Amino acid sequence: MEKKIENYDVVVIGGGAAGMTAALYAGRARLKTILIEKSLIGGLATYTSEIENYPGVPEGIDGTELMKLFDKQFRRFGVDVKLTDVKQIEKKDGFWSVQTFRNDYRAKAVVIATGGRPRLTGATGEDRFRDKGISFCATCDAARYTGKKVLIIGSGDAAIEEGIFLTRFCSEVWVSVVHDEGIMDANEVAKEKALSNPKMHFIWNTGVDSFEGDDLLKRVNLKNLKTGEIVPVDVDGCFLFIGYLPNSKLVENLVKLNERGYIVTNECMETSQPGIFAAGDVRDKALRQVATGVGDGAVAGYMAERYIGEIEVLEKDILSKEKVLAYFYNASEESDRALMTKIEQLSEECGTELK
């Protein structure tokens, strides 16, 4: 089947907070832009029942409702939206070719905002209770469990530090740890704080066997990894902190990734490939929140606009000429400003012979 070819200035891949913000900035800059999302506009934020730390929304807001506002706003600027899966990205005839099953979207710049996904336990009942008692972000959902009992799965830095944070809200924070008593994967400072916190309790040598409940999660059945004994824990909520996986497979052979699979960028969201930018949770960064995704997306959208402008100038005014004089200067340096007049004189003397 011959694919339909469509030309754009910018293709944004991913419809979460970062992707929608990048599309907003590109669209508002009058660039022909398309956003491609394979499943759900809004991304992981839609699984959060209440977001209380997004600036400008002092009363808090449901994640789905916030993402609906994002969706409504970026579409105002004429951005096209396509719900499909991207199969491949490659360079063709000087453009980036973003290929889906039926279409080939060719663009001058691409923003990768494919986000990530929490690592799951694979235990029985897990899918049933996602966002119905199973959470992945203490910063987002802590207030929801004020005065209640929660269970944390995991003992790495994120698990223990988020557990300590949860003790500000919860009456009890239990932690399932796969190691022997006293052994954790967290740093020593966090470990000592957790062990001395009266609200934190540990269940050693355990992993998740199953999740139970009715409309909401009510119980997590743990399994002792040495004896096989099932340890039922009645809870109001459960937080999974056993790792996070970036959705970077699409570009694993195209741009530089770090050892964990996150896309490496500079502060301008530029990847190792000119014309490809990355934003949001798929990027190597310290904090993954809606607010940081918005910041990444704004920078990526702006830098994509600037990149396209520079490429157009390069092709039209420089590469198309036979003789070019390029002068790189710092406007704050007096000597550079003085030399500028000589450059302008030389340009006048050469006339149309020199660009």
Image (cartoon, helix red, strand yellow):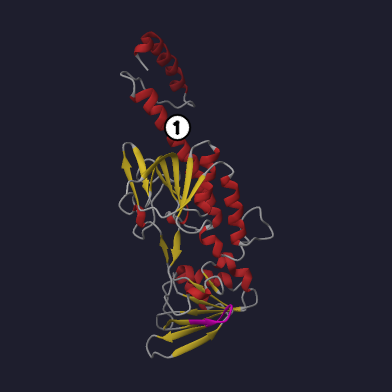
Kindly indicate the quadrant of the structure image that contains residue 354.
Answer: top left
Q: In which quarter of the image is the C terminus?
A: top left
**Residue 342 figure quarter:** top left
In the image: residue 220, left or right of residue 310 = right
| In-front residue for pair 277/201 | 277
Main SS, magenta region, reads: strand
Q: In this view, does 214 lie to the left or right of 271?
A: right
Residue 216 in the magenta stretch? The answer is: yes
For this orientation, the residue located farthest to the front is: 1
Residue marked by disc 1:
309
Q: Is residue 80 magenta?
A: no
Give the camera-side residue of 54 and 29. 29
Name the foreground residue: 230 vs 169.
230
Is residue 167 in view from this perspective? Answer: yes
Q: Can residue 327 be seen in this view?
A: no
Above or below, 179 against 76 in this view is below
x and y percentages locating residue 75 in the rendered image? 57, 46
**Mark 1 neighbour class, 10 Å CA radius: few under 14, some 14 to 19, many 20 or more:** few
User: Across the whole image, how many numbered discs are drawn on residues?
Assistant: 1
Please name the residue shown 53% across and 66% down the image: 137
Q: Where is residue 331 in the image (x, y as percent from the top left)?
A: 48, 25
Residue depicted at x 47% and y 25%: 333
Question: Which stretch is magenta?
Answer: 211-219
